[in-house]
Every structure is written in C-alpha cells, then in structure tokens.
Image: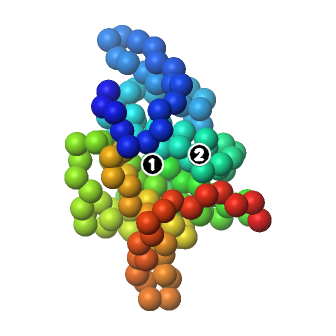
Amino acid sequence: MQNLNLPAFDYQLKSNENKTLIFDIIRKKYVVLTPEEWVRQHFVNFLISIKNYPVSLVAIEKQIHLNKVTKRFDILIFSNSGKPHILIECKAPNVHINQNTFDQIARYNSEINAEFLIVTNGLDHFCCQMDTESKKYIFLNFIPDFQSK
C-alpha cells in the first residue's frame, strides 16, 4: 500500500480467500484492505495516538438516512457529552479532493450536525469548522486535539 501523509503505526494484516484484511481497533474485527480502508485506518490511528481521542468516542461506518436513502459515514468522533463532534470522510489516495467531496460530507452533516468536518485522501487533509449561523465552512490549518470537558 501507498505511503501516506500520516504517521506510520503497527497494524495487523492477514490473508483470507485471496484478500488482504487489516484489523480495525474500533470495530474490533478484520476488514478488507482497500485503498480507502488504508486511509481510514491510518487516520483513526492518528486521531487516537496523536490527537488523543479516546477509542470509546470513535464510530466507523455507521448508517445514516438521507432523504430515505441509507448511507454510511466513514468516521464520526463524539464529544464527551455524546454529541457529534467531528465527521470525517476518507477517500483513496488516488481520489482528488474537490467540491463534490465537500458536498458529500455536507449532505451527511445535514443529518449529523457535527461541529467539524474533515476530508482526507491520506495525502491531503482539509478541516473546517461549521458556522451554523451563516451556513458556511471556516477552513482551519489544523485538526483539533481532543479536549476533555
């Protein structure tokens, strides 16, 4: 797999029926290793080991309903109070992040209402804070650390 613009970590791989699987510490199971999953696992590790988010506040690939259509978000970080805090959309490294990517995460966030949105392809990371009054993104040059409140 491709080197990413994220810290390396000790991951566990195994093979099963000609597929490579990677262990997901959040879902507590092996999942098929795709380029997008490679990014997701690196980003989760970054959030936990560098940004200090507790594992207990991280959700991966949960269903949401948008206009009677079932979708799945990539990563959602909750606050200590249980409210959605950061919604993260992961793309494969070869996927260029563009307006369509932000439109996708904004649609998801219309249901979730997280304070921060992050889009990453493992090479480029974009973080913005939602300004709910003006309904705009405020782009940040950092990814927020966990702060217990």
Whole-percent x, y for residue 23 in the image: 52, 25
Distance between the alpha carbons at the discs numbered 2 and 1: 19 Å
Q: Nearer the viewer, residue 134 or 146?
A: 146
Q: Residues within 10 Å of mark 2 (few under 14, many from 20)?
A: few
Write down the residue under mark 1.
Answer: 74
Whole-percent x, y for residue 126 in the image: 38, 61
How are the colours assigned in the image?
A: rainbow
Q: Quadrant of residue 29?
A: top right
Quadrant placement of the N terminus: top left
Give amino acid for label 2: Ile
Q: Nearer the viewer, mark 2 or mark 1?
A: 2
Q: Nearer the viewer, residue 4 or 15?
A: 4
What's the residue at 45%, 48% (across, down)? 74
Q: Residues within 10 Å of mark 1 (few under 14, many from 20)?
A: some
What's the residue at 22%, 42% (across, down)? 94
Left or right, residue 80 beside residue 3: right
Left or right, residue 57 beside residue 60: right
Q: Nearer the viewer, residue 133 or 1?
A: 1
What's the residue at 50%, 82% (across, down)? 132
Write down the residue under mark 2.
Answer: 50
The residue furthest right is 149
Element type at mark 1: loop
Q: Quadrant of residue 128?
A: bottom left
Element type at mark 2: loop
The residue furthest bottom is 134
Q: Is residue 21 visible?
A: yes
What's the residue at 51%, 59% (across, down)? 143
Quadrant placement of the C terminus: bottom right
